[in-house]
Image (cartoon, grey):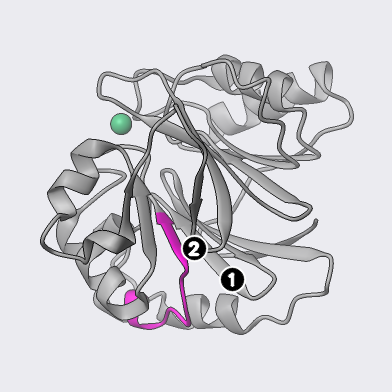
Amino acid sequence: MPETQDQSELIRGFFSHSLEKEEIAFMYLGYAGIILRVKERAVAIDIPHLLGNKEIDAFDKLELLLFTHNHRDHYNRARARRILKTTNAHVVAPAQVTDDLKGIIPSDRLTTASSESPIRAGGFDIVAVEGVHPRPISVYRISKDTFSVFHGGDSGYAPVKDYPAKVAFLPTGRPSPSCSPESALRFAMDLKPSIAVAMHGTPAQFSKFKDLVEKELPDTTVIIPENYKTETIPL
Ligand SMILES: [Zn+2]
């Protein structure tokens, strides 16, 4: 556990924070871990290894849980099981993860990510794209009505021009060997997001990414997130 402090109050605050109609909220948990609230629904990506039992029990709800791949800083079976028991969320993940969860959660709650066909799960439309990493990895565009979000795991650049997103969570480097501020910029140039959130990197990589985006994509705002802070952004 990278965080030894009890963060359950902050997570409770995230779920009880009242949202304007045209707003979404997100919380960054470190590495590529994100929780998102969109209207009455919640989505999480690459989170369970970052949370203790108290934090998991603080979840008000979760409709959709995505994993980009099974590296330790993105997926942990025991934590995933706990969060799924608590929330009943639907899982979308590459086969290495869904195979690992078979028999642990009901199969109708498990969808193996495939770049061949779009996925509907947890009330969202999901497109999985094969990323670039030492292990099989999926990066995702998640959408619903006017909302669209991209999550790049800790993948290197892969073409995603066909899947524009208003908000993009982009990996900028450490401890992944595949991504960098430059690969995150290439994702951003394909996606043309209004807001790009730096993740999975060092503070220096976050700020290098911010500088690159400000130069190349003046219409995109970059957020360097603080761990466990509730951030709201317009839809
Ligand atoms: Zn990895």
Examine the residues drawn in magenta and state their main secondary structure. Answer: loop
Foreground disc of the pair 2, 1: 2
Rate crowding at label 2 as few (under 14), some (14 to 19) or many (20 or more) other CA atoms within 10 Å.
some
Amino acid under label 1?
Arg
Q: Which residue is mark 2?
A: 122
Query: Would residue 221 be counted in the magenta stretch?
Result: no
User: What secondary structure is found at the residue carrying circle 2?
Assistant: loop
Q: Quadrant where the C terminus lies?
A: bottom right
> Which residue does the image show at 35% across and 26% down from the upper left?
176
- Say above or below: 139 vs 54: above
Quadrant of ligand 1 in image: top left
Front residue of 204/33: it is 33
Residue 47's quadrant in the figure?
Answer: bottom left
Left or right, 11 with reference to 19? left
The spot of residue 123 in percent (x, y) is 56, 63
Amino acid under label 2?
Gly
Cβ atoms under marks 2 and 1 closer than 8 Å: yes
The label number, if any, that marks residue 207 in the structure image: none
- The mark that comes first in sequence, 2 or 1, is 1
The label number, if any, that marks residue 41 in the structure image: 1
Residue 52 visible in the snapshot: no
Query: Would residue 59 be counted in the magenta stretch?
Result: yes
- Say above or below: 225 vs 202: below
Q: In this picture, which residue range is highlighted in magenta?
A: 56-65
